[in-house]
Image: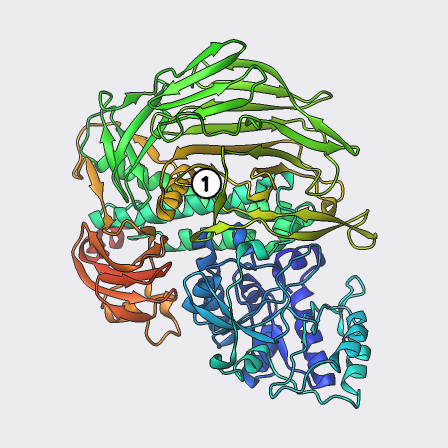
Amino acid sequence: MHWVDMEWLWGYHVLPGSIHDMLRFCHETGAKGNVNFDGVGYEKLASEYPEALSELRKAVQAGTVEVVGASYGQPYGALHGGESNIRQRIYGVRSAMRLLGIRPRTFWEEEFDFFPQLPQILSGVGFDGASLFFQWTWHTPEIPFEEAPVVLWTGHDGTTLRAATRNRLNLHQWPEDVDVLLSQLHDQSKDEKPPLILQWLELMPSPDWMCRSQVLLPKTKELLSDPRFEFRFSTLGEYLRTWPVADLQPRRYKPHEVFHGMSLGKNGDLFRRLSRKAEQSVLDAETLAAVAGLFGRPYAQWDVYPTWELEEAWRELLQAQHHDNDECEGLCGHIGRFSYERSLSLSGHVLNRTCDLLSRRIDAAEGDLVVFNALGWPVSDTFFHPVTGEPVVARDVPALGWRSFSPEQLEAKGPAWELKDGGAIGRRGEIEVVVDSQGRIAQISSPEWPEGALEESLPLLQFSCIEGGQPASFAVESISIDPQSLDLVVRFQHPVEGGIRAFVKLPADAAAVDVSLTAASLRRPDGGMNAGLQTAFQIRGSQSVVTDSPYAVHPIERSGVFKKKYPTGDWMTSKQWFEDVVAPFDAYSLVDLLAEDRGLLILHDGSPQWFHDEQGSVRNLLTMFDPWDEEYWIDRFQASYRLIPHGPLSHSDRWRAAQTFLRPTRVAMKLHSGGDLPASFSAAQCGSPHVAIAALYRETLESGRGLESYAASSFGVDYPYVVRLVELDGVGGPTKLSFAASVASVAETNLMGERTGDGINLDIRPFGIATLMLDLIEGRKQNRDLDAKREIWATVHRL
C-alpha cells in the first residue's frame, strides 16, 4: 500500500485502514505480515494518524510484522537515475528507522523495481534479503521462473542477496489464486527446507477496493485447514535467513531476460523526462552549493549549505517517481507532476542564487560569461549568448567548477548546412551528414566510418504508427535552415493532422549529430506499445548492442516475447486484452550499435523503450496511447538524440558522454568587473579513467541518527562532504582523488554513511559504487559573531 495515489484518491483512511486490515488478517490466521508502505507514507502517518503509526510500530517491534521494501517513493527503479535510486533507499531507510524504530533488511516491492546494480545499492543501505515476485496489476512484469524458492541474486558487481524467487507458489492478492495453489502444493518435493508460499496483499477495508481481509480470509482459512499440509508462518526476512548462502544457486539475471511490463512511451514519456530533468537539477544544485561552501562567507543562503531546500527537492522528486505516477498517469499523475515541478522550483532557486553569488565573486571582467560545470570531468558546451542570442562554444570547463570566458575566448558556432538537391549536406570538423529530399538522414560519415555509418536501406527520421488498424506515416513538408541557431529544420506532416519538426544539428563542441524532435497536434494512435509512434536506427554490419541502466553500462541480447495487457474500457471493471511485445529492452540514456571495433552511440533524453529487430536494427518508441489512462492522451512531445560515430569506446566513455548530453552547463554573466575567486576552478578530480565522480553534496549530523558508526560523528564538525564514485568498465583497482581543499578527515562509507574504511585512496572493485565522507577545512561553516552586534537589536526599539 502507499500514500502516493492511494491516499490522494481514496482519502486519509487508506494507510490506517490497511494497517488495521493487516493486523486483523494476522490475528485471525496466525500469519505474520510484511508491511510495504512508501517512506513518505510513514511520514504522513506520523502527522495524520499517529495512533495508527503507534499500532504498526508495536507490531513491528513485536516481530508480528516486518518492514520490507522501504524505498521512499516505490519507483520503477530502472526508469530513474542511479543517484535517484540511491536516495530512494537512503531516505526510505531513514524514515523507517526514525518512525518505526527498526532498520529494514528485506527488499520487496509491489511493482517491477529491478536493474543490475540494485543488489549493490540495497546491500549498501543494509539489506540482506529480497523478493523477486512482482505483481501483475495494471502491468505485466516478467522475471524468469525458478524451481527453487530462494536463489542468490547476484548484481552487476557481484554483490549477492538471498532472494525469494518468482515460482509456482507465488500468490497474487486474489483468493481465486488459492485454488490453483492447492492443486500444485502436493507436487513439491519433501525438501529439508519447506517451500515458500509468498502472497502479496494490498489490503484496504473498503467496498471500493477488491483486496480486503473480509474477502481473503475464507479461502486462506480453507488453505490452512487442509490436512495434507503443515503451515509455518514467518516474515519474508525470517524465512530467507534460514537458508545458508552456501546452499543457494547464484542467479545473475540479464537485462534481456526481464520485462518491466509498463506502458513506457506513453504520452511522449513526459514523466520520464520530468524525472530526469528534476534529478539533473537537484544534482547540479547540490554540487555547486557544496563547491560554493569552500569559499566562506558570504553564503548564497543563511547557512553554509541549503540542507532543507535540497533534501525537500529530493523528497518531492522521490515521491513523484512513484510507480503509480508512471503507470497511472491519467488517474493520479497530475499530482505527481506537481511534485516534479515543486522539486524543480526548489533546486532551481538554489542553482540560480548559487551561480549568481559565485559569478559576482569570480575575478573576471564586466560582460564576461562564467560557465559552471557540475559534472566530475571537464566539458565543452554550446549555448546561446545571453546578450547577442548567437550560438557560441565554451571549451574545457573544469570538473566540479567553472571557467570565465571573455567575448574573444568564446567561439562562434558558425554555419554547417547547405541546401542541395532538395535535401541538405552538413559538415563540421570531420563529421558529414546527408539529408535526402524526403527529409531523412541518409548517411553520417566520420573518420571511423568513411563509407558512412548508416545502413542505406534504413535512413533515419522515419516515423510510423498504427491508427484504426492501419499503418500511418509522416511525409516531409519542408527543409530549411534556421537563421538563429543555423541548424537544419525538417518539417514532417501527418496526412490528416499534426506534425513533427526535427532540428538536425552539428554541435561545435562534439563530433556528433544532434536531433531534436517537437511533435504537436498528433492524432491518437491505437492503444498499446506496438501501435505507438516509433523510429528506427541501423548501422552497416550491426553485430551487437550495448545499453545502460542506473549506474551501469552493459551488452544486451535480442531475446524474449512478453505479454502486455490493457483494459477494454473502465480500468477497474472492463475485460482486458493482451499484445505480444517482441524483443523489448529499456535503455536509461544510451544505446550503442556496434560493428566490430566501431559503432554509433545513440544518446537520448528520456525515451527509454526500445525494440531489437531481427535485421539488426533497433526501434525507439516515441509516444503511445495507454488504454489504462482511459481517455487521457497528450497529443504532443519533445525528444532529443545525440548520435556519435566512434571507434573503440569504453563503457565509462559512453556513460560520461550520456551525462554530458543530459546535463548541460550553467551560464551567468559578469555584471561588474573584479572578484576574490579565481577565474577558473575545479573542486575535485578523479585519477582513474574507469571511475566517474557521480555526485558531490553535503549532509548534516542528523543524517546519522540511529547509526552507531556514522563516519562524520568522529569528525568533530558538522556538514560533511559526500562524494559518490562509480566504476563503469569492470576493471577496478586503485583510485586516487584530489581536492582543491585541505582534507582534515576522510572515511570510506556505505551508502548510509557508516564507516567501512579509511583513506582518500580507494581500491574500487569492478563495477563498484563507492562513497567517501570528508571534512574539508575550507568548507567548514563560518559562524558570525552576532553577539558583537547585539546593540543593534537590543537598543533599536529605544528611539
Q: Secondary structure at mark 1?
A: strand
Say if 96 sits above or below 575 in the image. Answer: below
Front one among 303 and 316:
316
Front one among 471 and 318:
471
Say if 338 sits above or below 359 in the image. Answer: below
As drawn, is 723 to the left or to the right of 783? Answer: right
As drawn, is 220 to the left or to the right of 122? Answer: right
- Determine if residue 296 is in view: no
Say if 372 sits above or below 567 in the image. Answer: above
Looking at the rendered structure, the number of numbered marks drawn on it comes to: 1
The x, y position of residue 14, in whole percent, is 68, 65
Say if 501 sits above or below 173 in the image. Answer: above
The residue tagged 1 is 594
Front one among 515 and 689:
689
Front one among 275 and 583:
583
The x, y position of residue 11, in whole percent, is 69, 59
Residue depicted at 27% across the width and 43% down the height:
399
Which quadrant would the N terminus be assigned to in this image? Answer: bottom right
The x, y position of residue 549, in whole percent, is 48, 51
Q: Classify 10 Å Cα crowding around label 1: few (below 14), some (14-19), many (20 and above).
A: many
Q: Tag 1: residue type? A: Leu
Q: What residue occupies the far top of the structure in this picture? A: 421
The x, y position of residue 597, in whole percent, is 39, 40
As drawn, is 350 to the left or to the right of 761? Answer: right
Query: Quadrant of the rendered structure where residue 192 is?
Result: bottom right
Residue depicted at 75% across the width and 67% down the height:
211
- The colour scheme of the drawn protein is rainbow
Query: Quadrant of the rendered structure where residue 708 is?
Result: bottom left
As drawn, is 410 to the left or to the right of 16? Answer: left
Residue depicted at 45% across the width and 47% down the height:
279
- Determine if residue 414 is in view: yes
